[in-house]
Image (cartoon, rainbow, N blue to C red):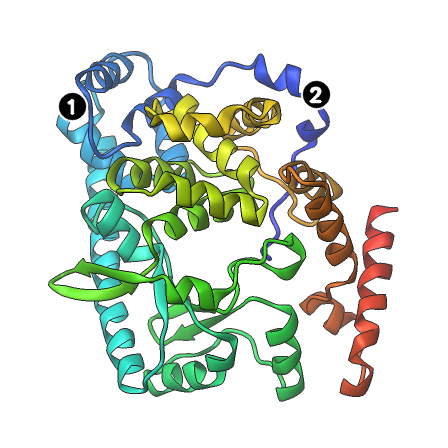
């Protein structure tokens, strides 16, 4: 997991965080963060863009939150008084993103065709398919890699198939470490001559310690098809896609607005079986995670939730956590994803006691790559990495 710097204000109580009003720049960003603009939304963009906006700060926020393409389209159509250099920066960012996304879309087609020839099942999600299905245009969403869900048993064959297309693992593992990581990890990144970390093979959606046991095989079995560029790609079902987006945003504690926007656009565009979605969320113990995700779309992006979605806001913890995440998101604050504060918040996002217990147990005993690097053990003694993990975790907390 990539580390980001911690923010000392995390120690402030939630009440003090809620009192800080979002900036005008963040308000304008939220107003622009949608594909379908209502007359009220357009009026808000016009009013905010015509006021005293720090445009350099606005551009920084738009880039940080992954919303430059959408912002560029909406501002160019409706905003007034944009400085020429800012308008040029927005158009340039849109063009760069379009070229990159078209390359990723063609690369996804090349990889999918090759996997089909090798009789390998891999489900792409997020990336260009999400841009096409939820945003209606591959140019409107920013992304930097291709995520492919596979069965753990297919990893070696998928790795070889990628090698035949010029991709190599981003980090080198010995055969022993590879077997270990397949049991305890969840993804591997791949590079090519075109750049680093361009493809991710994922055999689980989340690291094991999150204690959200959603088998990849079930996702693949329920998958359907999405059309992009005149070609059909295997894709997650609408319900699974929404749950996966909520889980991905929660893993990062909703620190970028693009992840909230993904959820809002999916709610807007996809026909969802709400009883099925709620049943799956309840089975996984992630009703609170889904509820916080929906609360943020409503609060920050003015998303009109359907009645079945509003029922997920009944949990009193949803609004309390939502206020905290919204305040930090408005400030562009980040977390140290290996800090006790982060682990505490993930714990609070689980509504069932048994899931909280499983989360803490797995957090304490599930080894990661850092544990392998800390102590060199022969494969026969790999079970002792649980002890190494627990010891390193205790040392970090103390």
Taking the image as shown, residue 210 lies to the left or right of residue 79, namely right
Q: Is residue 142 visible?
A: yes
Taking the image as shown, residue 55 lies to the left or right of residue 187, namely left
Q: Relative to 377, does residue 310 appear above or below in the rendering?
A: above
Please give the label number shown on residue 47: none
| Badge nearest the viewer, 1 or 2 | 2
Q: Mark 1 = which residue?
A: 78
In the rendered image, the quadrant that contains the N terminus is bottom right
> Looking at the picture, how far across and down is residue 119, in whole percent?
32, 84
**Residue under the image location 72 percent in, 46 percent down:** 354
Q: Secondary structure at mark 2?
A: loop
> Mark 2 Cα within 10 Å, few/some/many (few <14, many 20+)?
few
**Residue under the image location 24 percent in, 40 percent down:** 269
Q: Mark 2 = which residue?
A: 13
> Looking at the picture, how far across and down is residue 61, in whole percent?
41, 33
Residue 51 found in image quarter: top left
**Residue under the image location 17 percent in, 17 percent down:** 39
> Looking at the picture, how far across and down is residue 379, in whole percent?
76, 86
Q: Is residue 375 visible?
A: no
Taking the image as shown, residue 135 lies to the left or right of residue 147, namely left
Q: Secondary structure at mark 1?
A: helix
**Residue under the image location 83 percent in, 60 percent down:** 390
Q: Relative to 255, does residue 300 appear above or below in the rendering?
A: above
Residue 323 found in image quarter: top right
Residue 200 found in image quarter: bottom left
Which mark is first along the chain, 2 or 1? 2
> Looking at the picture, how far across and down is residue 87, in whole percent?
20, 32
């Amino acid at each position: 997991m990539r580390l980001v710097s911690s923010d000392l204000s995390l120690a402030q109580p939630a009440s003090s965080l809620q009192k800080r009003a979002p900036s005008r720049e963040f308000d304008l960003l939220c107003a622009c963060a949608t594909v379908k603009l209502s007359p009220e939304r357009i009026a808000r963009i016009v009013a905010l863009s015509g006021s005293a906006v720090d445009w350099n700060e606005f551009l920084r926020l738009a880039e940080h939150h992954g919303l430059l393409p959408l912002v560029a389209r909406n501002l160019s159509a409706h905003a007034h008084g944009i400085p020429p250099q800012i308008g040029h920066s927005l158009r340039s960012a849109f063009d760069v993103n379009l070229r990159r996304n078209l390359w990723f879309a063609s690369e996804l087609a090349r990889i999918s065709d090759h996997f089909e020839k090798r009789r390998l099942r891999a489900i792409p999600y997020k990336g260009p398919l999400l841009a096409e299905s939820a945003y209606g245009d591959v140019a409107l969403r920013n992304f930097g890699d291709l995520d492919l869900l596979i069965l753990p048993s297919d990893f070696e064959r998928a790795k070889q198939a990628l090698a035949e297309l010029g991709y190599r693992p981003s980090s080198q593992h010995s055969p022993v470490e590879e077997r270990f990581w397949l049991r305890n990890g969840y993804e591997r990144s791949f590079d090519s001559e075109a750049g680093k970390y361009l493809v991710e093979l994922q055999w689980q959606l989340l690291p094991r310690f999150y204690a959200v046991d959603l088998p990849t095989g079930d996702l693949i079995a329920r998958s359907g098809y999405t059309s992009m560029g005149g070609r059909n790609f295997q894709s997650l079902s609408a319900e699974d896609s929404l749950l996966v987006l909520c889980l991905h945003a929660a893993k990062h504690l909703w620190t970028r607005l693009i992840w909230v926007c993904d959820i809002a656009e999916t709610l807007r565009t996809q026909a969802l079986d709400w009883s099925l979605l709620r049943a799956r969320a309840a089975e996984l113990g992630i009703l609170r995670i889904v509820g916080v995700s929906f609360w943020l779309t409503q609060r920050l992006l003015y998303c009109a939730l359907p009645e079945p979605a509003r029922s997920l806001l009944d949990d009193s913890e949803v609004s309390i956590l939502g206020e905290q995440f919204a305040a930090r998101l408005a400030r562009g604050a980040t977390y140290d994803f290996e800090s006790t504060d982060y682990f505490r918040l993930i714990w609070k996002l689980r509504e069932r006691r048994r899931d909280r217990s499983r989360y803490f147990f797995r957090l304490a005993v599930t080894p990661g790559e850092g544990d392998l690097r800390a102590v060199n053990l022969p494969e026969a003694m790999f079970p002792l990495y649980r002890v190494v993990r627990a010891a390193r975790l205790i040392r970090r907390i103390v």
